[in-house]
Each structure stands twice: as structure tokens, then as C-alpha cells.
Image (spheres, rainbow, N blue to C red):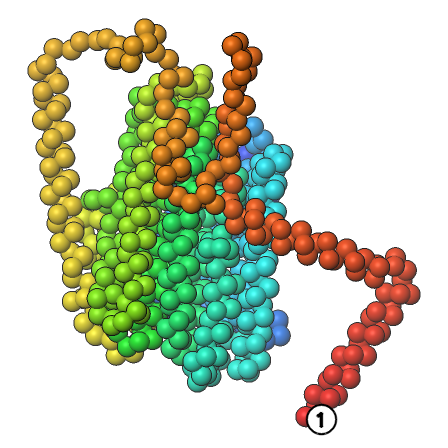
Amino acid sequence: MRLLLLSLSLLAGSAVLALLSSARPRLATGFGLGGAAAGALAVSLPALFCLGGGKSLSYSASWSVPGGRFALQVDPLAAFFLLPIALLGLLCALYAAGYLRGHARPRALGAHWFFFNLLLAAMILVVTAANALLFLAAWEVMTIASFFLVAFEHHLAEVRRAAWLYLVMAHLGLMLLLALFVVCGVQCGGFDFADFAPLTGLPVAEATLLFAVAAAGFGVKAGLFPLHVWLPDAHPAAPSHVSALMSGVLVKTGIYGILRFYTLLPSVSGSAGIVLMALGGTGALFGIALACFQSDIKRALAYSTVENIGIVFVGLGLGLYAAANDQPALAVLGFAGGLLHIWNHSLFKGLMFLGAGSVLHAAETRDMDRLGGLLQRMPWTGGLLIGGSLAIAALPPFNGLISEYLIYLGLLQSGISTAGIAGLLPLLMVGLLGLTGALAVVAFTRLTGITLLGQPRSAAAETAHESSPLMLAPMVLLLAASLAIGLFPPFALQLLAPALAQLLPAGTTGIPAVLAPAAPLGRWGLLLLLFFALMALLLAILRRLRPEAEGATWGCGFPFPSSRMAYTGEAFAELTQNHLLPAALRPEVTAERPAGLFPAVSRLAQRALDPVLIKIFFPAVEGIARRSQRLRWLQQGKSQVYLFYIFLTCTVLMVWSVLEGRT
């Protein structure tokens, strides 16, 4: 625990030093990077200790806040989430040092490093807090720090809108969490998580209701459908390393909150697992469908995060359902698949956002229709993006296949072993995830193909340059970790086993035997990797032996092919959007078609807006605002009227307390 406290101290101290050094950007970067690296390395050691031995560490100190206590605990579940925070925090800090070099506003770097390190410290505190008030304080610091990081380029109107949307949605979730912890603290007589032991005696119906409130409150941060609406705007607005950190680990703190609260309750109803599976499956299909239509690379990756969070909740929902219905083997598959996908998504989505940042850094645009030909100009970045796309599309030999395979296996076994109509939902979920996987292949074939291949479609793309080694090294390490899990899944599953045991019903045995089917995937992946390596070597030899000839490719009858003849992202996805998906998910198309013999102008454009945000949240907020206008008469602008309001409120509270005391 001394290392944990040291980590928090290093991160907080370096954040303050970076802010004080704003006038000297290089010094601020040195303080920020050094503190982030040291803090991440320090916290990774207790996390590995707890996961390796299945042990727990604790620390407690007095706190002057009523009901609060500076109580920390690192058990296997907390350690499971600490590892990706430490790894991605370290790599994103290294990347940021190269990404922000030569920034147009160098004096802003001190504030950036202040909030970056503060965010890391807050996330560590969130997953280790053992007191509800400390947890909520860390949760709020995490929200505020990430808000300022999202708003780093606040001179842009779209960045300001994205940051405010994120802040509003985050505090809507916080309101639910405040109510949840107040109810639990009052009922249990204390705000330490250890004081919540009486919750285990609640009836299943009451426990399920509390779990539903927790899932809604934490689900906002996690990006659980349909509470995801802040995510597709915030991730593109933030600097790319911040996008990687938020998508890779910040949204996972919402999942941690749900799982932590689940461990404090008795067995919840199986219906809670069904609802989570349904929301997760719907969110997975919704997210990847909208990712297929985005021309902004980072926005497409943000919708892919909604998809992958949905896949995680399908696995966790299956685990909840199986645990409530006394099916331990299925619970093992569901929880293990969901937990492993949390790690996997942190790796390959961090890689993809950092890769998108390298493209933006080199070509100064996120619009894939203005890119093209980058694989030749940025071979390292292009190759890493292709590897990350294979991992995120769950293709062998990378890690995405392992976690999704466990979830598929659990769903299939659940559907086969459950009699009657109850077995239909898991089988339907298999089909839905299969469709999601097919769309993921389309989405990332489109992203890499339009961005990396063909001819440059703008002057910026034509003059793009490769990223610096400081930016490439974190991406190489993330791809290597993704490949390692894909080739050697038993090691990753063994490392997460202690956290898995915390979620399973007491007395569950035979976990290694249930997870054994994942091991052959690694061996087949290794053989596939060797096969491709041999094929690449053979092609290289043949290319050397064959005489080279230069010439233009066939231009389909056009004597002078140009980049305007290449596929755009919209054209690539046209078949999918018009013939596969419902009209509610299709982009909004505006066209000014040519007319007459000599048309003056013709235009065609499309926008892929989020239908949940546009058709549900915005109308609901506007309706509330219109009704709230009727209460403006309460704002009299006179101090005596406001004093009367205070007097009236105090009177009502006194009467209520007297009546409550009599009962």
C-alpha cells in the first residue's frame, strides 16, 4: 500500500509542478511525463501482487469529512482495473510528449499535464476507494479533470459543445449515484463499503432495484446504450492520447462501479442479467452500425467503443443471469469473456486512437475522405493501424477473438441447455453478435482502406510524414500486448482468475476446465502467424527474382486517373446503409442534383447523426426547458422574497423532523 500512496503522491505532486511551470513548456512536460510514468509504474506493482497471489491490501486513515474515511483497498477486482490504468496511462503520457511537441499554444501544456496526471490519480483512487464518500469525491475529480482535457481545444465551438454534453451527462449519472449511496449508507449505518454488509440480507427484488440504479448511474460513464450519447462527441474533441485514455480505461471505471456494487449485494434477479444482455447487444449493433458511416476517423472509433462496451455487457449480463440461475459453468464463461474483453479493448482501442492521432498529426485532418495513400508515407503507423483493426474485428491471431469466443461459447451453451422460450434469447444474441462482427469487419476495412490505400486526396495527405519514435513506441507495445494475449490466452485468463472468483457464486470450482477451450485458439493463431510469415518471406523472395516493371494501373478506360475516381467512405458503406440497416440508423442525405442540359452545380452530402441523442435526449431536454420556463415567476429578484423561501423551507423541514421523531 505504500506504493499505492506513493503513486497518488507522485501524480498529484507532478500535476501541481507542471501547472506551476506553465511558462516553461518543456519543464512542464518533463514534470508531467515523469510523474505519470513514475506513478503508473508504482501502482502496477501492488496490482500485479494482488492478481498473482489473489490477496488483498488495505489502508485506512481518519478524514474530517462527516461519514468519510480515507479507506483504500486493493483486492483482485480493483487490481484487475488498476493494470490497464497503469499501462495505458504510462503509454499515453509517452505518446503525449511527442504529440504535443510544437503545439500552437505551448503555455497550455502546463494545464494539460495538470489535468492529465490528476485524471490518472482520480481513476486510481476510484478503483481503490473503500468508502462511499471518498469514492464519490474521486469520481467527481475524475469527471472534472476529463472535462478540461476534452475541452483542451476550447477555441473550437464543436469542442465546447462536446465538453458540455459530457459534463451534463456525467452529472446526471452522479445524481443517481449520490441517491444510491445515501440510501445504502443510511440503511447500513455507515459509508464504508465494509459497512454495507447488511445489504447481503436484502430480498432479491430490493437488491435488483438497487442494482438497476447503480447500472444506470455508472452506465453513463461506461457508455452503456442508450446512455452513451456523450461519448461519440467527446472522444473526437479530445486530444488523441486523451481519447485513448478515456476510451481505454475511463469508461471502464463505470463497469468497475457496477461490478463493485454487485459484489456488495446478494444474488440479483436473473432478469437483471437479461436486461444487461439486451442493452449490450443492442448497443453493440447500434455502435458498429453508426461507425460504418462516419467520415471522421476518431468519431468512427468512438462508436466502435459503444460497440465493444456492448459486447462487454453481453458477457457480464450472461454471467449475472447464469449466477442467479445456479449455472456456474455458464457464469464462468460470461464473466471471463466480459472481463477479458475489458483488457482487450483497452489495448486495441488505445492503439487505434493513438494511430488516429498520428494520422491527424501528420495530415492535419481526421476526415478519411481527404486522406488516402498514407501506407506508403507512414508505413509504421499504417501497419500498426491494420494490426489494431484485425484485433478489434476479432480476427486471429489477435486478442479480440479470445474474449468474444468465450462469450459466444457461453451464449451457445446457455441457449442449448435452457429449455423452452427462455433459451431463445441467448441464441438470438449469438446471431446479433455475429451481425455485429460482420459489420466490424466492414467498418475497419473501410477505415483502413480509405485512409491508408489509394492515392492522396488532399495536399496534406500527399505531404504526410511518419510519426516520431516517441509516438510509435507506445503503439508497438499495445499491438505486441494484443498479439501476446491472442497467442497465449491461458496466461491472461490465469491472471484475471482472482478477479473472476470475486464475481462468481461462493464455492464455484473447476474454472480452469471451463476456460480450457480458449487455449487451442492460441496454438492455431501461432500456426496462422507462422504461415503468414512464411508467405511474406516467399513473396519477398519472388519479388527479388522477378524483374521490376513500372506503369500505371488500369484506369477503367480513363486515360488520366485521379484521386477523385477513388472510393469515398460514404460510397464504401452505401450498400450496408441502404440494404442492411433500418431507416432509423441511416445517415441524413442532402442532395442538389444536376438539372437541365448544362447544370451549374450539383452537391451530395450526408451526416451520420446519433438518433438517440437527436430524437430522444434533445426533445426531452427541450420539453423540460419549456416547462421550467413556467417557474420563472419564482425568480423575483428581491432579497426579502428569497429570505421568505428560506424561512418556508426551514419550517417544512422542522415540521417533518418533529413528525419523523414521533413515529
Amino acid carrying label 1: it is Arg
Q: Is residue 601 above or below residue 141?
A: above
> In this image, 593 relative to 319: left or right?
right
Question: Toward which corner of the image does residue 494 lie, by quadrant?
Answer: bottom left
Q: Is residue 4 above or below residue 609?
A: below
Residue 60, visible in the rendered structure: no
Image quadrant occupied by the N terminus: bottom left
Task: Name, please, the residue furthest toward the bottom.
Answer: 662
For this rendering, which residue is in front, 408 or 133?
A: 408
Which residue was labeled with disc 1?
662
> Image point 12% across, 47% down: which residue?
524
Question: How many callouts does the rendering have?
Answer: 1
Q: Position of residue 414 (x, y in %)?
A: 25, 67
Task: Name, please, the residue furthest toward the top.
Answer: 559
Tell me the crowding category of disc 1: few under 14, some 14 to 19, or many 20 or more residues within 10 angstroms, Cα based.
few
Q: Is residue 116 above or below residue 24?
A: below
Report helix, strand or loop for mark 1.
helix
> Image point 84% across, 59% down: which residue?
633
Q: Position of residue 113 (x, y in %)?
A: 52, 43
Task: Name, please, the residue furthest toward the front.
Answer: 596
Image quadrant occupied by the C terminus: bottom right
> In this image, 320 relative to 114: left or right?
left
Q: Position of residue 512 (x, y in %)?
A: 18, 66
> Image point 29% across, 12% down: which residue?
555
> In this image, 467 relative to 333: left or right?
right
Q: Position of residue 173 (x, y in %)?
A: 55, 60
> Image point 50% across, 32% down: which residue?
589
> In this image, 135 relative to 271: left or right?
right
Question: Toward which corner of the image does residue 170 lie, by quadrant?
Answer: bottom right
Residue 513, visible in the rendered structure: yes
